Image (cartoon, helix red, strand yellow):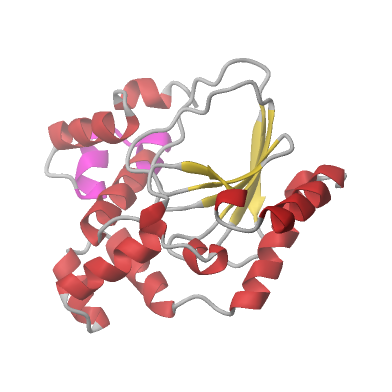
Amino acid sequence: MYSERASRLSGAVVWSRTLEEPVVRPVLPDGCMDLLWVEGRLLVAGADTRAYVPDGPAARYAGVRFFPGTAPALLGVPARELRDRRVELSDLWSARRVRRLTARVDAAVDPVTALEDVALELAADTGPPDPLLGRLVAGLGTGRPVAAVADELGLGVRQLHRRSLDAFGYGPKTLARVLRLQRALALAQSGVPFAATAVRAGFADQAHLARDVRELAGMPLGELLGLG
């Protein structure tokens, strides 16, 4: 069973998952990074460029999904170093600090809220996120070309690419593609026909939509929707 809610940390989502049977639904690229609690372990999930299917015997998960581009400043590591990876938090921070935080979340009545509290403390120590990143996500999220968004932000395309690697783990073109996938999924899940979904999400045509979904999600759109 999966559940989520808006976090007290601006732009973030907190979620929990209990697995009563093998995982079927993949975790799809969304431009985000997560802080995870997995039955007594703290991990960081980097931004994905392809579908990820959790494995292993763990049955309980809790997570904080940070707004795109904001996690690297909180965690103290460039996003490009974590792209398509799940790493132990102790690989990024001191073992002593991670043991203390792990014990705190383990002992909590609600691991989700305890993990959220950790994220809020990180944000308080770090300060507000770079507003440029939010503007970048907003601009690309509407389907605008990368060059147009870069010009609006007052950045050269190469400069924007370098900043995107640190903030998102990949360049702005990949981020735009991931956000377009998420737009298409939201439309298709709401019942919009696939052909109309392709047009409204910014694909050249339905065949383009089908190729991108298969490449990023690892399965056809109809099969993916059937897992929900």
For the stretch drawn in magenta, what is the main secondary structure?
helix
Q: Please provide percent x and percent y for residue 65.
A: 56, 52
Return the residue nearer the eye: 193 or 178. 178
Q: Is residue 53 above or below residue 43?
A: above
Tell me: 50 left or right of 23: left
Q: Is residue 189 inside the magenta stretch?
A: yes
Tell me: 18 left or right of 167: right
Return the residue nearer the eye: 154 or 203. 154
Q: Is residue 84 above or below residue 211?
A: below
Which residue, as the protein is rendered here, is positioned at the far bottom? 154
| Residue segment shown in magenta | 186-202
Residue 37 visible in the displayed image: yes
Give the total of numbered labels.
0
Quadrant in the rendering for residue 38:
top right
Q: Please provide percent x and percent y for residue 25.
A: 48, 25
Q: Please provide percent x and percent y for residue 36.
A: 62, 45
Q: Please provide percent x and percent y for residue 73.
A: 50, 69
| Placement of the N terminus among the 4 image quadrants | top right
Q: Residue at x 13, y 39 (%)?
A: 205
Tell me: 11 left or right of 141: right
Residue 191 visible in the displayed image: no
Q: Is residue 127 above or below residue 222?
A: below
Q: Is residue 212 inside the magenta stretch?
A: no
Q: Residue at x 42, y 50 (%)?
A: 82
Tell me: 50 left or right of 95: left
Which residue, as the protein is rendered here, is positioned at the far top? 21
Q: Is residue 221 above or below residue 168?
A: above
Quadrant in the rendering for residue 134:
bottom left
Q: Residue at x 24, y 32 (%)?
A: 215
Quadrant in the rendering for residue 198:
top left
